[in-house]
Image (tube, helix red, strand yellow):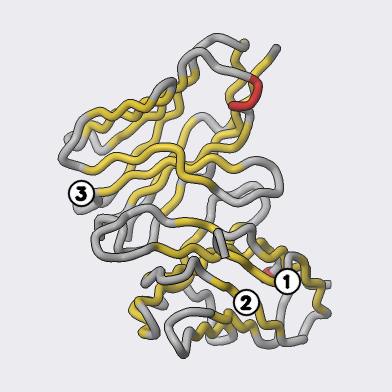
Amino acid sequence: GAGVSQSPRYKVAKRGQDVALRCDPISGHVSLFWYQQALGQGPEFLTYFQNEAQLDKSGLPSDRFFAERPEGSVSTLKIQRTQQEDSAVYLCASRRGGGSTEAFFGQGTRLTVV
Amino acid sequence: GENVEQHPSTLSVQEGDSAVIKCTYSDSASNYFPWYKQELGKRPQLIIDIRSNVGEKKDQRIAVTLNKTAKHFSLHITETQPEDSAVYFCAATSGGGADGLTFGKGTHLIIQP
């Protein structure tokens, strides 16, 4: 596709439910990032992949959060036993690699936990 | 880790006037500083960026300045237009873009007609 695609765009989950958020990066992009953006705030780094390797997961807020990118393209962010404080927009970004610095963002998934 | 402070949180300017948004960072190892524009409900989009080996960069009506000694950088928009209304985020990283970005809290820029 032409840009980073995320699905679903909106997700409403009951507290305690598990959710899975999908990111399709730009084809051929080596690097993939997940960010969490609370209402009225800047994006906060969650995790970073280079191809299929998860090189940094220091931003994941708890062990309920898990991300994977098994074939080095599509990535999934999974949140187990969702809580109200997990409500936010989850943004995915990809970067070509090879010295390229620009990160291209998807439109995000707005997660609301009720 | 890195900490980025951004000011002001809201900025209202008359159409045609200039707007300046300022950010400070804490990690002296940071070497890449992008600025993103985010319209309501849309994705953040890169508008300009600067590396630490450059003091200033300009692209038409937009410019960014960097002071490494003081650890601050600023976004300047001249001849503002209604379509400039959005939230602007500064960010910093120490990996030349290889690591995750640390963002400021954003500035809501309002262009008054």
Lower sequence index among marks 2 and 1: 1
Say if mark 2 contacts mark 1, CB within 8 Å.
yes
A53 left or right of B44?
left
Which residue in the structure is indicated by mark 2? A22
How many marks overall? 3
Q: State which chain disc 1 sits on.
A: A
Task: Tell me the element at label 3.
Answer: loop
Question: Which residue lies at the image location 64% right of the left edge and 82% below the top edge?
Answer: A79
Task: Tell me the element at label 1.
Answer: loop
Question: Which residue lies at the image location 42% right of the left edge and 25% below the top edge?
Answer: B62
Q: Quadrant of residue B111?
A: top right
Mark 2 and mark 3, same subunit?
Answer: no
Q: Is residue A87 above or below residue B77?
A: below
x and y percent of residue A67 in the render?
52, 83
Which residue in the structure is indicated by mark 1? A8
**Residue neighbourhood size for the residue with mark 3, other residues' Cα within 10 Å, grouped as few (<14), some (14–19), many (≥20):** few
Task: Tell me the element at label 2.
Answer: strand
Q: Is residue B80 above or below residue B91?
A: above
Which residue in the structure is indicated by mark 3? B28
Question: Which residue lies at the image location 62% right of the left edge and 11% below the top edge?
Answer: B14
B37 left or right of A12?
left
